Image (spheres, rainbow, N blue to C red):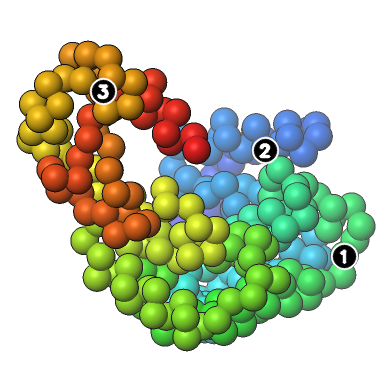
Amino acid sequence: MTDTERAQILNYKLMIYICEGNDQEKLDWFKIINIAGEKLTDQEARNAIFACAWLDDAKKYFSKNGCPAQMLYGKYLSGKAIRQDFLERALEWIANRDGLLAVEFYMDAQKQNHTPDALELWKYFKAVFAWVEKIFPNFCSKLMKGQAWGKFYNANKDDALNATELEEKISQLIKDKEVTNKRGIYEYLLDGDEKHLSLRAFDDDQKAEAYERQGGICAKCGKKFEFEQMEGDHITPWSKGGKTTAENCQMLCKACNRLKGNK
Ligand SMILES: [Zn+2]
């Protein structure tokens, strides 16, 4: 650089904040000074607060382009290593495993205990994807990238699951037009909750047809209601092969429908 350029840099006045206080106060400070310029991600701000030997080691695994997390499991992860998205996922999942309410609790413990390296986190992360590769061996980027795999692992790692049976169910569910959220298939297969599938709902035409057929009478309690006070219900549920067609629609009053839903 020329002398003039050097002098310009050396004479440039920097605005320095010295943030004092506990970890939470420092994090709040970051939020305030983070409004202008290139914004830090939440995990970048956490890294500034919880800097320690453990974090330096964790960054080797999770935080650089071409890091092991990206090379080995990048196809399962959304976001960018250098913006700390992979480190954040790993921390969210291990915090979830340990029943911690926030990533900060896990990071704080490593700093306080002077944990020398991040081997625990890295081994855990590898175990998550060893499990995913075992039970869902057929990789599909559109459906599998960015899922909360660690949380599924925490909840279901000890379940007896058969990859071949799961694979059959996956291809059935992908073909099933009633399933509108195909990305929810994995979680549904693990916990059995149909809400992950966003099953098709009846449209207004189908509901109007059923309403006319019933003469406005609720199919459960037998009382008469306005159209707006009623909801469409599958006579034969999806789990028993029922489709979202007018013939399979019955109108229930909201109270009856809620009772049915709770069963
Ligand atoms: Zn009713």
Q: x%, y% of residue 134?
A: 57, 84
Q: Examine the image and state in which quarter residue 119 appears.
A: bottom right
SS label for mark 1: loop
Q: Examine the image and state in which quarter residue 36 appears.
A: top left
Give the residue type at disc 3.
Answer: Cys
> Image height check: is 12 above or below 96?
above
Residue at figure coordinates x 67%, y 63% from the top left: 154
| Residue sitting nearer the eye, 179 or 104 | 179
> What residue does disc 1 label?
115
| Residue sitting nearer the eye, 221 or 31 | 221
Residue at figure coordinates x 70%, y 71% from the top left: 158
Res. 27 mark: 2
Q: CA distance from mark 1 to mark 2?
A: 22 Å
Give the residue type at disc 1.
Answer: Thr
Give the residue type at disc 2.
Answer: Leu
Looking at the image, tell me whether mark 3 or mark 2 is earlier in sequence order: 2
| Badge 3: residue crowd in 10 Å (few <14, some 14–19, many ≥20) | many
- Please identify the residue farthest to the front as the structure is shown: 222
Res. 218 mark: 3
Report if the CB atoms under discs 1 and 3 are less than 8 Å apart. Answer: no
Q: x%, y% of residue 108?
A: 80, 50
| Badge 1: residue crowd in 10 Å (few <14, some 14–19, many ≥20) | some
- Please identify the residue farthest to the right as the structure is shown: 113
Q: Examine the image and state in which quarter residue 129 appears.
A: bottom right
